[in-house]
Image: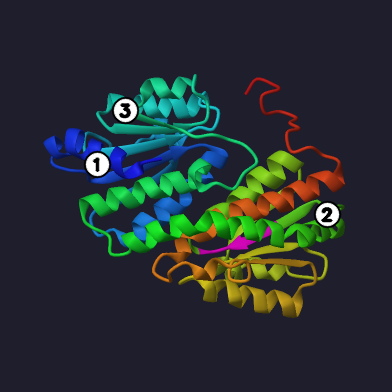
Amino acid sequence: MNTSAIISSLIEQRFLPQGGLSQVFLVACGGSLVDMYPANYFLNSESATLHSYMMTANEFVHAAPKTLGPQSLTIVCSHGGNTPESVAAAQLAQRRGSVTVTLTHNENADLIGFSDSNLLYAWGDDSKVINNPMAIILSLCVEALHQTEGYEGYADFRAGMEQIDGIVSRARRQVQARSAAFAERYAEESLFYILSSGASYGHAYGFAICSLMEMQWLNAASIHSGEFFHGPFEVTDSNTPWILLMNEGRTRGLDERVRDFLRQYGNKVEIVDAKELGLGVVSTSVVEYFNPVLFYSVMCEYRAALARIRQHPLETRRYMGQVAY
């Protein structure tokens, strides 16, 4: 997808007449909101003037910030494209004069009706970054930054986008045996804690609420690696399962500190290390932003293995789409 052309067109036709782009709102629900975390982390890390806000759709509808307006870019993602809260969020954004970009894989989605530009992505069992909403949203925000105030890491980021498909494909093959062993060992567990930091903390949250709670009906909670030693580590014992997503980049030290503690005092510890999985070939200036793209595909292997051994298909739902709520 040509995210560069999309942002360039919107800046020229919509933002320049209004005085420029000032803020980006990243709005969605559940897994789609998780896909926005890396972009929000990126903008907060790299931008001096472009402000980023990430909000769950229904809160955005009920408590939209006053800054939402003609100098805003609102990105709304809904996988099926008909999530009522997300559709309402896009509608509100347009009503307030914001430029609205939407993402969905449903060409007949209601969401598209409230979009200045819609990105339709394919969906299936592949690792192509062009069909990964997380990477698409990140790319949109990289372009927004580069075309408004400039971004020194732009060339490195584009090179990383060229590399990531190969990295992900190799990593998925690399974890086949270990994800099966993980499922075998933890098939009877009912609670997991998921740890990570930096741009990947959003995926720790996503793996907890989507892959485990929604898709496997297992209790789970995400904990930021930087917060582990400020309360959560007190529940560490030989019976509590931990999954640690270890990043490449600036926050790796936070994850390593957690790893060292868990190895000393814990027993049920699964470490998924981006460095071991080959992400280090990406330039150090941008590598941290690619961690969650890698973790998403790799952890899909883990959840699939767990679903198989527990005989609980990933599509099974008790309430979602089954009852009124």
Numbered tag placed on residue 189 in the rendering: 2
Q: Please name the amino acid that badge 1 sits on.
A: Ser
**Which circle's residue, 1 or 2, is located before the other in the chain?**
1
- Nearest the camera: 305 or 227? 305
Q: Mark 1 packing: few (<14 Cα in 10 Å), some, or many (20+)?
A: some
Q: Please name the amino acid that badge 2 sits on.
A: Glu
Q: Position of residue 217 (x, y in %)?
A: 76, 41
Q: Mark 3 packing: few (<14 Cα in 10 Å), some, or many (20+)?
A: some
Q: Position of residue 198 (x, y in %)?
A: 49, 63
Is 59 displayed left or right of 94 in the figure? right
Q: Position of residue 122 (x, y in %)?
A: 54, 34
Residue 296 among those drawn in magenta: no
In space, the residues marked 1 and 2 are separated at their CA atoms by 49 Å
- Nearest the camera: 4 or 150? 4
Tell me if label 2 and label 3 are in contact, CB under 8 Å. Answer: no
Numbered tag placed on residue 116 in the rendering: 3
Q: Give the extent of the magenta segment.
A: 193-197
Q: Is residue 253 visible?
A: yes
In space, the residues marked 2 and 3 are separated at their CA atoms by 46 Å
**Which colour assignment does the render follow?**
rainbow
- Mark 1 or mark 2: which is in front? 1
Residue 194 among those drawn in magenta: yes
SS class, disc 2: loop
Location of the C terminus (image quadrant): top right
Q: Position of residue 101 (x, y in %)?
A: 36, 34
SS class, disc 1: helix
Location of the N terminus (image quadrant): top left
Q: Please name the amino acid that badge 3 sits on.
A: Asp
Q: Mark 2 packing: few (<14 Cα in 10 Å), some, or many (20+)?
A: few
- Mark 2 or mark 3: which is in front? 3
Residue at 41% across, 51% down: 39
Q: Is residue 201 visible?
A: no
